[in-house]
Image (cartoon, rainbow, N blue to C red):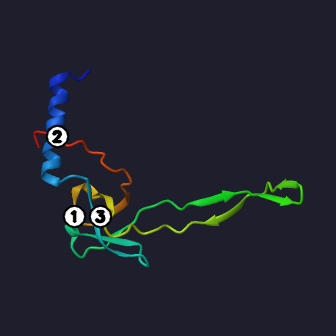
Amino acid sequence: MALNNSDWAAIQDLVNRMITRVGEPFLQGKVIKTDPIRKVVFLKEFGSVPIPIVSFDYQVKYSFKETSGATTIKKTKAYSEEVEILTPRVGDTVLIARHYGSSRLPKCLGVIKSKRYIEANEED
């Protein structure tokens, strides 16, 4: 049995009502305070609730060329270093995930690096 347009409209209506009741799952806001030791940020919207930074561990691999006189020797062995995750700075705009739209247990997913990515609408 295939779903028709009215079925899809009913599903979308239910989703919209759930979002209205629960709240948006994502929020963006400006960092007002940081704690680099604990790797948390604070946003005005969450008051004194520390928001942990969510990230994968990274590893950087690199090789280098060594010049000895007129001869350049390329070292083929890769060297690895652990990378420290930087805490967003005060004033950075970050993306926050809110579990099921709840204001409890928010997570900072990252800094929004793009600038002027929202087009201003003349009707707004």
Look at label 2 and name its amino acid.
Asn
State how far apart marks 2 and 3 are (Cα): 30 Å
Q: Which of 118 and 84 is in front in this view?
A: 118
State how far apart marks 1 and 2 are (Cα): 29 Å
Nearer the camera: disc 1 or disc 2: 2
Look at label 1 and name its amino acid.
Ser
Q: In this view, does 26 lie to the left or right of 56?
A: left
| 35 in relation to 53, above or below | below
- Quarter of the picture holding the N terminus: top left
- Quarter of the picture holding the C terminus: top left
Look at label 3 and name its amino acid.
Pro
Residue 103's mark?
A: 1
**Residue named by callout 3:** 106
Label 2: state its secondary structure.
Answer: loop
Residue 121's mark?
A: 2
**x and y, in percent, of residue 4 in the image:** 20, 21
| 5 in relation to 84, above or below | above
**Label 3 crowding class (10 Å Cα cut-off): few <14, some 14-19, many 20+?**
many
Marks 3 and 1 in Cβ contact (< 8 Å): yes
Tag 2 or tag 1, which sits nearer the N-term? 1
